[in-house]
Amino acid sequence: MNERLIHGMVLASLTVFSVGCASLPDQGLNPHDPFETTNRRVSDFNDSLDRSLLRPVAVQYQQVAPELLRDGVGNFFGNLADIWSTANNALQLKPIETAETGMRVAVNSVFGIYGLIDWGTRLGLQRHNADFGQTLGYWGVPAGPYVVLPIFGPSNVRDTVGLVVDMDQNLWANVDPTATRYSGTALRVIDKRAEFLDMDKQLDQVALDKYAFIRDAYMQRRKAQTRRGAADRDDGNGAGDSGKEERYDQ
C-alpha cells in the first residue's frame, strides 16, 4: 500500500472510532478504557469480519498451502519487519537487541535468499520485535486511553500514532508494481491470521469476557515492552525488589 492509502486507512479507522465515541455518552468505567462501549462495538465488528472472511480464508490457506511455502512467507515478511525492529531497538538504546536483530537481517538477507530461509534462528540469533509505539513509550510518552481500531484491532492513542509511522516505514509499501504489492500484502495478512488459528478455541475456552481478556493482555504486554531498565527478578510477591530503576508506560 502506498503512503497515502496507509494514512487514509488509519484516518478512516480513527474517524469511525471518534464518531462512535461521540454518539455514546455512557461509556465504560475502567479508567484505562473510558470508551469501552464504543470499543466493544468496534471489537464486535472486527470479530464479525474475521468470522466471515479472514478466518475461513486462513483455514483454507493452511490446508492447501504447503508448509514450506507458509514458512517462506512468514520468514520473508519477518525479515522485513526485523529491519524496522533494528532501528527501533537502536532508538531505545538497546545495544544487544539492536546488534542481534541486525545480525539476523544480515544473515537472513544474504544467506537466506532475502529472508525466505531463517538461518538466523538456526544460528541462535534471537528476534527482538520493536515498533515505534514501543519506542515512544520507552521514552515516556503516555499510552493514553485504550482503543480498538476498525480492522487494526487493539491499540491506544500512542500506539495508533506509532502505527502510522510503522506502516510508513514498511519497506513493502514501496514495492512496485502495485499488483505485486497488494497481492503480497494480502498474502501476509492471511499467513499471519493462519498463525493464530490454534489459539481461537483456547481463547474461547479461557476467556469468560473475550473483550476484557484481550484488552488486559494487550495493556500488560505493552507495559512490559516499554519498560526502561532491567526487569526485577523476584518471586512475584514484592519481597525481591532488585532496586533497579525502571520506567513504565502509563
Image (cartoon, grey):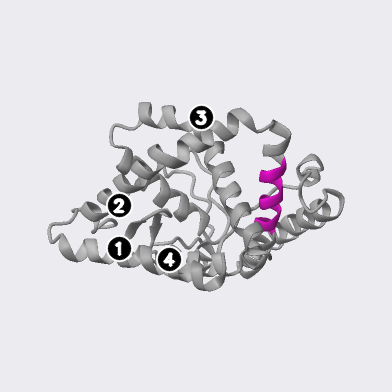
* Element carrying mark 4: helix
Callout 3 amino acid: Asp
Report how far apart the C-alphas of labels 4 and 1 lie in the structure: 10 Å
Part of the protein shown in magenta? 72-82
Quarter of the C terminus within the rendering: bottom left
Q: Which residue is mark 2?
A: 42
Report how far apart the C-alphas of labels 1 and 2 lie in the structure: 9 Å
Front residue (pair 26, 1): 1
Q: Are marks 1 and 2 in contact (CB under 8 Å)?
A: yes
**Residue at screen point 31% across, 43% down:** 211
Place of residue 46 in the rendered image (x, y in percent of width and height, measured from the top left): 36, 47
* Element carrying mark 1: helix
Quarter of the N terminus within the rendering: bottom right
Mark 2 neighbour density, 10 Å: few (under 14) some (14–19) many (20 or more): many
Question: Viewer-nearest of labels 3 and 1?
Answer: 1
Q: Which residue is mark 3?
A: 198
Q: Which residue is mark 4?
A: 10
Q: Which residue is mark 1?
A: 16
For marks 3 and 2 on the same chain, the one whose residue lies earlier in the sequence = 2
